Amino acid sequence: MTTATTPEQETGAAVECVGVQKSFDGTPVLRSVDLAVEHGQVLCLIGPSGSGKSTFLRCLNHLERIDGGLLRVAGEMVGYREHKGRLHELRQHEIARRRADIGMVFQSFNLFPHMTVLENIVEAPMSVRGIKRSAAEEDARRLLDKVGLAGREGAYPRMLSGGQQQRVAIARALAMHPKIMLFDEPTSALDPELVGEVLAVMKELAAEGMTMIVVTHELGFAREVADTVVFMDGGYIVEQGAPAELFANPQTERCRDFLSKVL
Ligand code: ADP
Ligand code: MG
């Protein structure tokens, strides 16, 4: 039996990549990435510096344009829409709408320094989603409580530790009620004693069923939380599997070598 599906249709996977390619000035950075992430799954992406991990996340979040292949997030194509059997490039407002469904947390927190914690969190729901201030603030307070920062809504980012700032950044991303959360080395900029509090929030999110893609060197977190670990090198997915399996029994020299340096 054949089923007619259009690329716009909600599919089974939260993220679907087929043959995704991306070059910068003729240098391939993603060579042909095939990947599927199911709803509610946590995927940890590991690999050496320069292997294309951040570029991959940026493509998922419409921050980079892919040169080839097909990318679908939350059932919607990245970069294109289909109309009468033909692909059309997305317009800016369409990109903005699709990006609103994707939460992203960066290594460097990226909070607005001149805004309070509360303003940081309510800004996008109000301006992008058109939520009323009272409702946005109520949701922000709930989220601050969730990330262990109840009562800090009036603080400015500079008054907070790195771990607290990153938890605000997570609350800010969640305030858009995203369908998927992307994390790009969320604990790499933190002092070691602050890493745990951020990972604990992420672990709770995972337990609640959030679909997550996490670039991380925290292999303990990956082992405990990830459904799948993907090892990337040189713009390719070299290996993927369940964490226990991949960590205990890497199939390639490159993955073995990487794990021996990080573990
Ligand atoms: P990773 O996150 O795994 O460390 P990146 O995705 O940041 O890797 O980078 C992969 C490669 O792409 C690197 O060689 C990097 O220099 C290059 N690169 C990333 N972004 C750009 C860009 N905007 N312009 C040119 N080269 C880039
Ligand atoms: Mg990176």
Image (tube, helix red, strand yellow):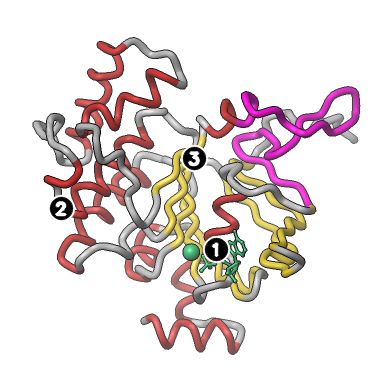
Between marks 3 and 1 in the image, the one whose residue lies nearer the viewer: 1
Q: Is residue 254 above or below residue 88?
A: below
Q: Which residues are magenta?
A: 69-95
Q: Amino acid at mark 2?
A: Ser
Magenta stretch holds residue 80: yes
On the picture, is 1 further left or further right than 27? right
Picture coordinates of residue 118, whole percent (x, y): 22, 28
Q: Classify residue 223 by image quadrant.
A: bottom left
Looking at the rendered structure, the secondary structure element under dot 3 is strand
**Which is nearer the N-term, disc 1 or disc 2?**
1
Q: Quadrant of ligand 1?
A: bottom right
**Residue situated in front as seen by the camera: 234 or 124:** 124
Q: Which mark is residue 161?
A: 2
SS for tag 1? Answer: helix
Please determine whether, in this image, residue 113 is positioned above or below residue 246. Answer: above
State the quadrant of the C terminus. Answer: bottom left
Q: Earlier in the sequence, mark 2 or mark 3?
A: 2
Could you say which disc has been placed on residue 180 in the image? 3
Q: Specify the quadrant of the image occupied by residue 53.
A: bottom right
Residue 53 marker: 1
